[in-house]
Image (tube, grey):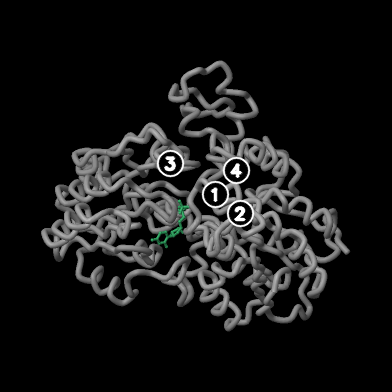
Amino acid sequence: GRGTASDTGSGGGDVKAHFVFIPLMFQGHLIPAVDTALLLATHGALASIVVTPSNTGRVRPAVDFARKSGLRVRLVELPLELAAEGLPEGADDVDKVPSELWPNYFRALARLRAPLESHLRAHAPYPTCVVADFCHAWAKELAASLGVPRLCFFSMCAFCLLCQHNVERFNAYDGVADDHEQVVVPGLEKKIEVSRAQAPGFFRGIPGFEKYADEVEQVLVEADGVVTNSFLEMEPEYVAGYAEARRMKVWTVGPVSLFHQRTATLASRGNTAAIGADECLRWLDGMEPSSVVYVSFGSIAHAEPKQVVELGLGLEASGHPFIWVVKNSDQHGEEVRELLHKLEARVAGRGLLIRGWAPQVLILSHAAVGSFVTHCGWNSTMEAITAGLPVVTWPHFADQFLNAKFAVEVLGIGVDVGVMEPVMYRPDQKEVVVGREVVEEAVRSVMDGGDEGEERRRRARALAAKARAAVEEGGSSHGNLLDLVKTFEVGAGCFATV
Ligand code: UDP
């Protein structure tokens, strides 16, 4: 019933720290938050993960596995009050909420505060820390009312967080009339340029979120710290720079996907995959090492049908084997469906189309994969880095433009397709943004780009080695997880709780 929670979780026992994770229930936020919660549990904490009913299935395989291995993890399932916010039935699953209704969806999420607080008060042990996605402004009131510290959760690189913060705190866009004019990001040693269209700030410029953007910033300012899916050795100056600018502790705990590389849950992150893990692996096993281009644009971005065809033709022309994740193929219309079927027949044996959800980390971990054409959602970018792969950067919206710049200009592992503005939330969006020749050239460049291509690949592999070291015993992310558990123990130092 409303306001009650189905607690599938284990007993508290002698837990010292109890983290309550409140993910945003978009896959790009939910997946890394769950991974982080499970990682904290591996260090002895109790982790409670809040989900709404349609997300339980997305989270359960990993949580069940963790519990079977003796970790203390609870799922707290709370229903959304959809009707109260004018949302249709089924809108609990954000994949089914049109973006015009996202403001309503966020208001429905905020209504979780009271039932969640009641649940937490009724189920011992009492929380010692709330870890809420930075998008949940209402978590501030929740933590305050519970009397416990609150951390803001991000799956973003510190480079992106610092660029965005500096652009805002130094008013870099003031007096810049043209949304597309490139301005230098203030306060960095390296010269990075970005436009307001590419990096407007969290929730800025999205209709219906005007006031929410300010609220989210204020709630971040008042947080007790930041937890993010990055690792120190990849970007030490930006992690330090962001912590200093915010005057708060930043715990980098990534790459969090590595939790799964030691478990049987690698193929079960997020939605149910549209292809069996065995079939996928068999296909990859038949390919030469580092020969396959993996192409996917994450869980939200959806391309215009004409752009989809253009991308397919570019991949075909590149001559390289590829796995291409095609989303929303049911919405493409007969003509485009037909074109894709013909293309699929022409590339049979070297091109695999996955219509729907792909077991992405399973694919990226396979030795046959040689590069990743990505929209630069931070999880995907981090997963490419973890797999030691160079990337073709094709940002669509939100933090993706800054992530693309990070991959190309800071890490030196990317080839950019040259998209200059977001393709989402724009009524005037062009149908084809990136032509087939550009796709072909970018893929050729990342796959066989001579000395430069070799250098990119070498840098990507070196980063992957550092990423792995970060999560091992003695590594920075491993150490930060331990530090989190210690810092938020019952009765610990400055964060003493009830
Ligand atoms: N993902 C996946 N299969 C898909 C699409 C996405 O497993 O077909 C996962 C991907 O591995 C990543 C997350 O979903 O962990 C997407 O997050 P990201 O930040 O890359 O992009 P977003 O979806 O937020 O735009």
N-term mark: 1 or 3? 1
**Under tag 3, what secondary structure?**
loop
- Distance in Å between CA atoms under marks 1 and 4: 35 Å
Ranked by sequence position, the earlier of labels 1 and 2 is 2
Q: What label does residue 86 carry, if any?
A: 2
Which residue is located at x 82 percent, y 56 percent? Answer: 495
Q: Which residue is mark 1?
A: 101
Q: Could you give the CA–CA distance between mark 2 and mark 4, rounded to whole angstroms?
A: 41 Å
- Do callouts 3 and 2 mark residues in contact (Cβ within 8 Å)? no
Q: Nearer the viewer, mark 2 or mark 4?
A: 2
Q: Nearer the viewer, mark 3 or mark 2?
A: 2
Q: Which residue is mark 3?
A: 424
The kind of secondary structure element at disc 4 is helix
Depth check, front residue: 237 or 261: 261
The reply to whether residue 163 is in sight is: no
Q: Reply above or below: 217 against 302.
A: above
Quarter of the rendered image showing ligand 1 = bottom left
Give the x, y percent position of residue 212. 65, 41
Residue drawn at (76%, 43%), measured in percent from left and top? 222
The x and y percentages for residue 293 are 26, 55
Q: Nearer the viewer, residue 135 or 349?
A: 135
User: Pointer 2 and pointer 4: residues touching (CB < 8 Å)?
Assistant: no
In this view, 164 is above or below 339:
above
Precedes in sequence: disc 2 or disc 4:
2
The quadrant of the image that shows the C terminus is bottom right
